[in-house]
Image (spheres, helix red, strand yellow):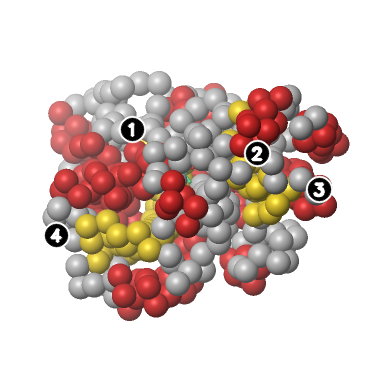
Amino acid sequence: MLIKRKDNFSTKLIHAREPEKKPENALNNPIFMTSTFTFDSLEAAEAAFEFETDDYVYTRGNNPTLKILEDKMAEIENGAAGVAFSSGMGSISATLLSLLKPGDKIVAHQILYGSSYKLIKEWLRDYDIDGSLVDFNDFNKLIEAIDENTKVLYLETPANPTLEVIDIEKIAELARENDCKLVVDNTFASPYLQNPLDHGANIVVHSATKYLGGHGDLVGGVVVADSKDYAMNLKFNYLTELGSVMSPFNAWLILRGIKTLKLRMEAAQTNAQKIVDFLQAHDRVKSVNYPGLESDKAANIVKRQMVGPGAMLSFELDESVNKIREFVNSLKYFKLAVSLGDIESLIEYPFFMTHRDYDEKRLYELGISKYLLRISAGLEDTNVLIADIENNLQKL
Ligand SMILES: Cc1ncc(COP(=O)(O)O)c(C=O)c1O
């Protein structure tokens, strides 16, 4: 399944919000590796401090390379403005701190990336902010969890590592009715496959470390909001003070990665679909999680909300834990690693890696068993990837 986008997305990825004329007529943007900017006069400095001019002051507040990335992200997420951060967690923590005050409550979907889970469930508690985790696919439970103190609803879709899909439109409606902001982590889908703001979300957060950068060579984060005022408040009252600013060099690498996002996503998705077909037909595979399956309970939501199901999948092996450990250790092309969205195919064992701090009983309730492996399909030849899985399953 890959619905063709009708908005000339490749052209947007390459050309949107690029400066019309670059220094020295360069095709590509220079990297402004400078901590501070100089002024011709004190009057010019005063005007910049008063936001009367767009002159740059200091890279923790603003920088021309970061600005191109922020503008391009706003364009490709159909938002009002973007803000770049030093990491995905930098963007998520600053966003939540900007929206929540002591006494407030955040309600999040029960399956979250580990550090987001810890931030919401444990860390915010120390600041008297109640973090409640419920199943967003159980609408009655979600309605029950929202009270007059709830200011934020937070979700990832598809979720990590079960690839569960949440109906953004439905949750956005609930957020509006309850005067809450809906924040969606769009890392797994990327802006090519899904634009949460189009479905009513207020704020999108990204780990740009993943598909946006795309080459596993940087850590970065980006927020895109539906309101320019909110984004400016986040940038100049939270990013600037909390300080998790992105390096201009990383912004330049992400801008380079974004140009090939569509090509990379489509190629990785094709590999993922072929791997899913192979796994589904294999007798040692107990179950496969992939939003592209017709049997997926969210298949209709996927069709409405996503351009394609993406390149992340997970599956359970019908083998002992020792055999599964052997399998993971013997793969040649699926590198054992926690990240995703890279050129290289990656495999991850959530129970023993990313989710090892969770309560075991809870993991089972969430469908994250000792037998579950997660794959981020890369761009290698499909036959090589499938042969790697097939040969190493055969050896067990
Ligand atoms: C869904 C999701 N959100 C956020 C993050 C955090 O991003 P970063 O590692 O760039 O801080 C990750 C990292 O793996 C992730 O998978």
Residue 36, quarter of picture: top left
Local packing at callout 1 (Cα closer than 10 Å; few below 14, some 14-19, many 20+) is many
Q: Nearer the viewer, residue 367 or 254?
A: 367
Mark 4 burial class by Cα count in 10 Å: few <14, some 14-19, many 20+ = few
Secondary structure under the numbered disc 2 in the rendered image: loop
Q: CA distance from mark 4 to mark 1?
A: 28 Å
The image quadrant of residue 180 is bottom left
Task: Determine the CA span between mark 1 and mark 3.
Answer: 46 Å
Q: Position of residue 325 (x, y in %)?
A: 63, 31
| Residue at the spot of label 2 | 320
Is residue 150 or residue 173 the one in the foreground? Answer: 150
Above or below: residue 253 compared with residue 363: above
Instruction: Determine which of the numbered discs, if any, sits on residue 282 in the image.
Output: 3
Q: Residues within 10 Å of mark 3 (few under 14, many from 20)?
A: some
Q: Is 245 rendered above or below residue 196? A: above
Whether the residues at callouts 2 and 3 have beta carbons within 8 Å, the answer is: no
Q: Nearer the viewer, mark 4 or mark 2?
A: 2
Q: What residue is disc 4 on?
A: 103
Count of picture labels: 4
Measure the C-alpha gap from mark 4 to mark 2: 47 Å
On the rendering, which quadrant does ligand 1 occupy? Answer: top left
Q: Residue at the spot x=71%, y=25% of the render? A: 330
